[in-house]
């Protein structure tokens, strides 16, 4: 078997790992790389292999850095099945279609400004029509259900606890008379996250591809992080400002909505309008409601006590139209606006940031990891000036970073996750992490006598 690491290698985004087994090709994830705009387009556009020769895709979960380049894969000739959990199928179908719309809309907006400067137009990476084809290629699988994506490989999904439908993937492989198990962690969630069940650890694994996003950092308890979030919201609303939250439309948005619901229900923060301003987040919240089997016991209990849905309450409005979204920028009353994208690189949140960044009453609240060179990272670094749609803005608003809300496992859980296969694992490959984080984790694993840990280069291939 050969593994080629074509994404999320020496970086976090763009998950894409190609397995060659028994003469067939199985792709684990096909995510969109996010980073410098000049690099992003070319890197996402071009594959290092022929998509027409890929025999199946297994998708760990719906986040765009894992699913977002599927439309381009299909556009370039892939025409087989994409396997995912049933909740992931529903979410990813929405997300890639939304990504297609955003690609087109952002290109149109930027081209309008480029035309004013006499510059040539750019083309979107792919269009919504390309993304729509992906939905027909999904095959929904239950957690724990065995399926055979390519000959000689029996796969199963296990709860990853990261977002709705997220999964770790076990692959029981038979090749040339040899039998072994490979485990792909996808993105590993955390214990005690709102809404979701806890991640299932790997067992009896020979080889493991594992994320390392927070390999250098332990997380605070999620409950402590939401106490900090509550303080930010309360302070901003009391001074008459807006809280702008760039949040991934799937997962983080729903977690924040649930906690705002709980805080207003218990009168811990002032009553104020809450807007979820992302067509994808609106639709994704409907998908969450369709899959209560993925909810944890605490969420079920709150729904019973509050006697209304977890993701809907009196002060909450799901914004659907562009006109409604634009109207929010005309309002001066205190409010909370949750909008995609999570790294503030595209979508409606960019417009909200542009319209509110120069008002000192407001707060931009960063609630997730931000890739280098993204607008979200520049805000998290509190740069005094930022470029938005090719124009410079002074940052006069507050910026709050709430790291403890991450849906990714911290260093302590990553170590525990790997230790669960210590007695069986022959080699661990660290992906989905920057060098400092991955190498820190590698050193800690070595301290636990787990020496066969490798941090592969982008496009590196390894024979097993």
Image: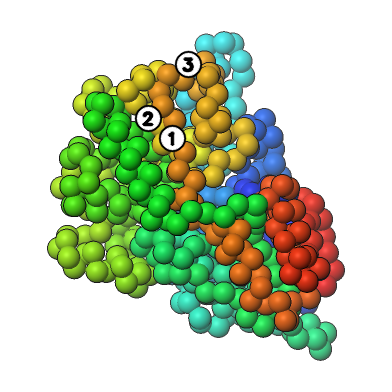
Q: Is residue 40 above or below residue 24?
A: above
Q: Is residue 365 above or below residue 265?
A: above
Tag 1: Cα neighbours inside 10 Å, few (<14), some, or many (≥20)?
many
Give residue 430's quadrant in the image.
bottom right
In screen coordinates, is 314 left or right of 225? left
Residue 143 visible somewhere in the drawing? yes
In screen coordinates, is 143 left or right of 457? left
Q: CA distance from mark 3 to mark 1?
A: 17 Å
Count of numbered circles in the view: 3
Identify residue for label 2: 363
**Tag 1 secondary structure:** strand
**Residue 413 at x, y percent in the picture:** 57, 64
**Tag 3 secondary structure:** strand
Mark 2 / mark 1, whichever is N-terminal: 2
Identify residue for label 3: 394
Residue appearing at x 18%, y 68% in the figure = 304
Identify the residue at the far right of this view: 463
**Residue 243 at x, y percent in the picture:** 33, 33
Mark 3 / mark 1, whichever is N-terminal: 3
Nearer the observer, 100 or 328: 328
Residue 327 visible somewhere in the drawing? no
Q: Are marks 2 and 1 in contact (CB under 8 Å)?
A: yes
Residue appearing at x 61%, y 70% in the figure = 417
Q: Are marks 3 and 2 in contact (CB under 8 Å)?
A: no
Mark 3 / mark 2, whichever is N-terminal: 2
| In front: label 3 or label 1 | 1
Identify residue for label 1: 400
In screen coordinates, is 352 left or right of 308? right
């Amino acid at each position: 078997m050969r593994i080629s690491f074509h994404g999320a290698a020496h970086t976090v985004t763009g998950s894409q790992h190609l397995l060659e087994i028994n003469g067939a090709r199985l792709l684990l994830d096909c995510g969109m790389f996010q980073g410098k705009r000049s690099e992003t387009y070319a890197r996402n556009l071009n594959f290092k292999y022929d998509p027409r020769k890929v025999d199946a895709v297994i998708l760990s979960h719906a986040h765009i850095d894992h699913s977002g380049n599927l439309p381009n894969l299909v556009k370039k000739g892939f025409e087989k099945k994409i396997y995912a959990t049933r909740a992931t199928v529903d979410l990813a179908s929405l997300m890639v279609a939304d990504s297609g719309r955003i690609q087109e809309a952002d290109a149109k907006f930027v081209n309008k400004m480029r035309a004013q400067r006499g510059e040539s137009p750019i083309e979107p990476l792919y269009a919504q029509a390309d993304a729509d084809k992906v939905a027909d290629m999904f095959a929904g699988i239950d957690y724990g259900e065995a399926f055979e994506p390519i000959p000689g490989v029996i796969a199963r999904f296990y709860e990853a606890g990261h977002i709705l439908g997220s999964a770790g993937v076990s692959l029981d492989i038979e090749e040339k008379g040899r039998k072994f198990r490979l485990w792909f962690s996808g993105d590993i969630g955390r214990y005690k996250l709102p809404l979701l069940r806890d991640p299932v650890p790997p067992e009896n694994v020979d080889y493991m591809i594992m994320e390392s996003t927070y390999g250098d950092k332990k997380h605070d308890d999620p409950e402590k992080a939401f106490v900090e979030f509550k303080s930010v919201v309360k302070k901003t609303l009391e001074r008459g400002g807006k809280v702008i939250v760039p949040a991934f439309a799937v997962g983080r948005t729903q977690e924040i909505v649930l906690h705002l619901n709980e805080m207003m229900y218990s009168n811990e923060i002032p009553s104020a309008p809450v807007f979820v301003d992302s067509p994808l987040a609106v639709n994704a919240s409907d998908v969450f409601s369709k899959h209560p089997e993925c909810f944890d016991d605490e969420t079920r209990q709150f729904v019973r006590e509050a006697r209304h849905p977890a993701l809907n309450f009196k002060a909450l409005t799901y914004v659907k139209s562009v006109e409604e979204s634009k109207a929010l920028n005309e309002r001066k009353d205190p409010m909370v606006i949750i909008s995609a994208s999570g790294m503030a690189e595209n979508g409606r949140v960019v417009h909200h940031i542009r319209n509110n960044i120069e008002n000192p009453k407001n707060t931009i609240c960063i609630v997730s990891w931000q890739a280098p060179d993204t607008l979200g990272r520049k805000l998290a670094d509190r740069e005094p000036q930022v470029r938005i749609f090719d124009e410079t803005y002074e940052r006069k608003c507050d910026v709050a970073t709430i790291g403890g809300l991450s849906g990714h496992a911290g260093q302590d859980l990553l170590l525990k996750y790997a230790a669960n296969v210590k007695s069986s694992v022959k080699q661990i490959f660290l992906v989905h992490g920057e060098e400092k984080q991955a190498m820190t984790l590698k050193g800690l694993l070595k301290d636990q006598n787990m020496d066969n840990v490798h941090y592969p280069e982008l496009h590196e291939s390894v024979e097993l």
